[in-house]
Image (cartoon, rainbow, N blue to C red):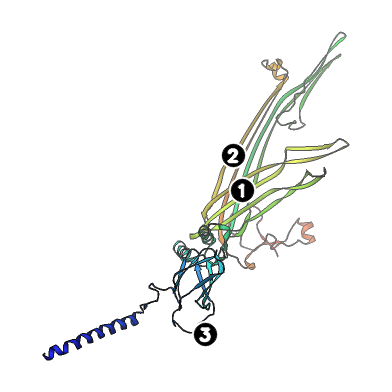
Amino acid sequence: MSDLQKQKPASVFTRIFQIFGLILLAVILTGLPLAGAPDVARAADYSDHPGAPLSELDLVPEVINLGLNKSIVIDLPRPAKDVLVSNPNKADAIMRTPYRAYVIGQEIGQTNIFFFDEQGNQIISLELVIERDLTALRGMMDRLLPGTNIDIDTINENIILTGTVSSQAEAGRAADIAGRFAGDPEKVMNMVTIEGMDQVMIKVTIAEMERSTAKQFGIDIDAVIAAGSTTFNLLTANPFSVTGAPLTGTNFGANYASGGDSVRAILRALEQQGLLKTLAEPNLTAVSGESASFLAGGEFPVPVGSDDNGITIEYKPFGVSLAFTPVVLSEGRISMRVKTEVSETTTDGAFSIGSSSSSATISIPGLKVRRAETTVEMSSGSSLVIAGLIKEETRQSLNGIPGVKDLPVLGSLFRSHEFQNSETELVVIITPYVVEPTHRNQLALPTDGFSQPTDSRAILFGRLNEIYGIAGSSPAGSYQGNAGFIYD
């Protein structure tokens, strides 16, 4: 037998041991499980010391946050014989192998899970906190609201938003997104703060012109004609149905008397024209997202029945009122809901309440109201006009004796003609501004600089306040009459 043949068996055994050693080294370096260990990747590994005595195990409960309807894999250091879940409705533990368990979060809340070996010794214990998985919501916030700093937390089924945004609109969008994610907007607590809270001042100009014309032309006749022992009377007193009463007490009359006959005629030919101008410019400031309102006017009492058959008094407002809710959007745009109203008491629509046991009556006036309400979106400093609120009303009336009043020429003595026309036009101009607070020294009041005159100036010169002027100078602009400055 040659030397080569003698060395051949030894080389084969050497190669086998080398291969086995390489496999063992590869197993150790790669961390592949040996026989009897789990054969899948572990999410929570407690097998650092397999087979270690119980006294060396860390039996302190470990807190694990698990998303709702999510699962986690638990690798155990020794085979488990028994599993205890304190609240199976919250979580479920499924033993894949004695060394591996799958834990699934089923409801939001907290529960405990304990693993025991064959001798009843505790292997590990878990404090499981099941909550909403907010990973998708955080990604959605970053994608839809870039540049914001919003933190998201949960308490049970509720979502809490904290952090800062640049405007009220972004805070509202964040709350809407979280509400859709939770499935119920009531489960979202929006604690987001706005950096540099925006304030909006709205300037409203209300201008109204009202023109009215009324005309009356009529003849009233009072005649007494005696024919022997018979006397004939003729009396016409045409009413003024359009206006409800004569325009004035002025009239022109003529009398004729002869024996027992007399004729008296009164001519009413009157015309009335009226012009009414209403101008109001209320200004109001509010924080973005909040409402503000004010009323410049008054209130009048209105009796209202109560449950005990008595009468209570309620007060109804009238005057110039303004209410608005601004929301500052991105890029300096403002969304506003504006409601403005101009009202005044009037005899039109008024009524009186009398008492059967007393001659006293209660008169309740009516209200003449011009109101405008709208929601607009505009930039700071731009204006919006609400126009076209025009009202025109025409009334005519013809009163007289039937048949006679229709006679040509002669019929005008037995009839009365009335005409009334009224025109009203209302214009509302709205201008919002994004403003910041200023110092008190930069503000002025209508009473600033007012000073009472001395007795001598009030008596001798008729001054109501002290004024002074600067010699050789005049205020800028075009003025008529006396111009000066209030003396302080």
Residue occupying the far front of the picture: 1
Residue corresponding to mark 1 = 206
As drawn, is 86 to the left or to the right of 214? left
* Image disc number at residue 390: 2
Asked whether residue 194 appears in the rendered view, the answer is no
Residue corresponding to mark 3 = 55
Is the C-beta separation of discs 2 and 1 under 8 Å? no
Q: CA distance from mark 3 to mark 1?
A: 86 Å
Image quarter where the N terminus lies is: bottom left
Which of the 4 image quarters holds residue 479?
Answer: bottom right
Q: Is residue 96 above or below residue 289?
A: below
As drawn, is 368 to the left or to the right of 79? right
- Report x, y in % for residue 323: 63, 52
As drawn, is 305 to the left or to the right of 442? right
Whichever of labels 3 and 1 marks the residue nearer the N terminus, that label is: 3
Q: Is residue 350 above or below residue 60?
A: above
Q: Residue at x 64, y 38 (%)?
A: 211
Which of the 4 image quarters holds residue 283?
Answer: bottom right
- Report x, y in % for residue 270: 71, 30
Q: CA distance from mark 2 to mark 1?
A: 14 Å
Q: Give the amino acid at mark 1.
A: Ile
Whichever of labels 2 and 1 marks the residue nearer the N terminus, that label is: 1
Q: Residue at x 19, y 87 (%)?
A: 9
- Report x, y in % for residue 268: 73, 27
Asked whether residue 223 appears in the rendered view, the answer is yes
Foreground mark, 3 or 1, reads 3
Could you tell me which secondary element the residue under label 2 belongs to?
strand
User: Which of 42 and 202 lies nearest the eye of the viewer?
Assistant: 42
User: Which of 431 and 247 lies nearest the eye of the viewer?
Assistant: 431
**How many neighbours does mark 2 have within 10 angstroms: few (below 14), some (14-19), or many (20 or more)?**
few
Q: CA distance from mark 3 to mark 2?
A: 94 Å
Whichever of labels 3 and 2 marks the residue nearer the N terminus, that label is: 3
